Image (cartoon, rainbow, N blue to C red):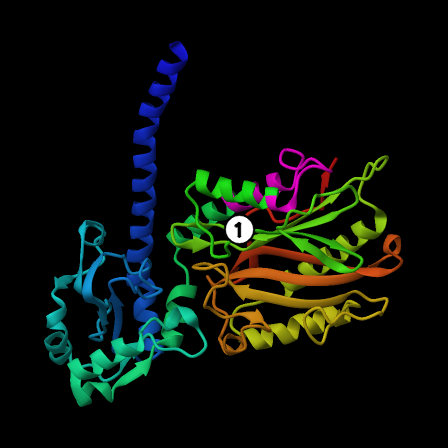
Amino acid sequence: MKNILFFLLMVLFSLPMNAQEAHRRWRKMNQIRNDKFDLILPEVMRENDIDMWIVMSREGNFDPLYPDLGGGYVGKNGYYIFSDSGSGRIERAALGIAGYLLKEGGAYDHFGAEEELKSYVEERDPQRIGLNISKSIGGADGLSHSGYEELVELLGAKYTDRFVSAEKLVSDFRSRRVASEIAAFGEACELSYTIAEKALSNAVITPGITTLEDVAWWITEQQFKHNLESSFGMPSVYITGPRGILATSTDKIIERGDVIMLDYGVGLMNLYTDMKRIAYVLREGETRVPDGIQNAFDQGVRVRDIIKQTIKPGVTAREAEGKVYEALEAAGFNKMKGFNQYTDLEETDVIIGCHSVGNWGHGVGPSIAFFNPVRLDYEIKPSNLLSIELFAYTKVPEWADKKLRIPLEDDAIVTERGVEWIYPINPRIQVIK
């Protein structure tokens, strides 16, 4: 009976804490939104020469920026509208979008019906109207074809001729960070790396018994426990051997001598991480990581240090990429021609993918990554978040000189000084006994 009473008391006392946590997160997201509207939006609208930005959402088909802009209840159609009158502040309106959370957030000046759209636009008479249409950035491509047709019909030829893509505006708005946003992202990172490092330990893994998918499901359980999201689906827990990746998040049992990699991220308050961790399972009689595997990791760390020292703001991502590879080659590393196209050279082969991070595991800002060709030409700015990602392939004598791929990835912020880490980065290969 005492145990039952204790359990009930614990449940009762936990309820206010859950409500408080939800309220705390909501307040922080409101602060981020208001700060970005005040500090970032005027700058990026003027840089992109956009007088009015219309973001259309429909019930059941929200724009990707829906959480950034405050959410809210949408009936048939809803419009977030941002107008630049030339003064310091951007005017903000929500037409056809309502709800307690949106109104209490304090970010909007005017709430109205969706039918007001035409008169609202005509009254302000913008010369360039940004719409979320993009061929290269999914997060900036929220306007559907039928939604575009509705806007054409509603606003007429005069304003249709003034429509422009808001692709670059969306990238700039999302990827330039305010202090409140960086603080929230740091909180997400702390949760992310602590879960990752526990996952690759004897607290979760028993060699000969635990499977890769057991580890992936344990991570997923932790995300549910902490009310976290993810932009990657199932965490990638995989084994790498002399023949490359052997299995990823499958029922393969983890055995002694395995090199285990983890690639995943969590989402908290509309901010998403992306990081990797590595572990080695000791064989019977071993007390440390074999020298060849440790050396491969050490080469990856050398690469990471060079990347961190080289990236600076004020240049395009493509220019930064060129400088990084120049520095790596000067240090004796070999630049690979393409992903996984490693060589038989004695040198460590390297490819980098230092992509934007933040509002998804792969963000929409400047990206020093071969898989984001359009954003290679975007300028790196202070406050951009980057996932410093690399793949280094080094020969391992214990594997008959086959190369081991070491993937390192942790999240950082670009400042006037260069790249700065937000949390304790991966310092070692974790050992599983």
Locate residue 355: give its quadrant: bottom right
Q: Which quarter of the figure is the C terminus placed in?
A: top right
Foreground: 206 or 127?
206
Judge whether 101 appears above or below 177 on screen.
above
Q: Within 10 Å of the Cα at label 1, are there few (<14), some (14-19), or many (20+) other Cα atoms?
A: some
Residue at horizontal 55 percent and vertical 60 percent from the top: 387
Say left or right for 206 vs 198: right
Range of magenta residues? 191-213
Q: Nearer the viewer, residue 174 or 201?
A: 201
In x, y percent, where is residue 290?
A: 83, 46
> Which quadrant of the figure has residue 47?
bottom left
Residue 405 in sight from this viewpoint: no
Percent position of residue 260, x then y:
70, 48
| Residue designated by label 1 | 422
Residue 420: x and y in percent read: 56, 56
* Badge 1 amino acid: Ile
Left-right relation of 77 to 227 = left
Q: Is residue 287 visible?
A: yes
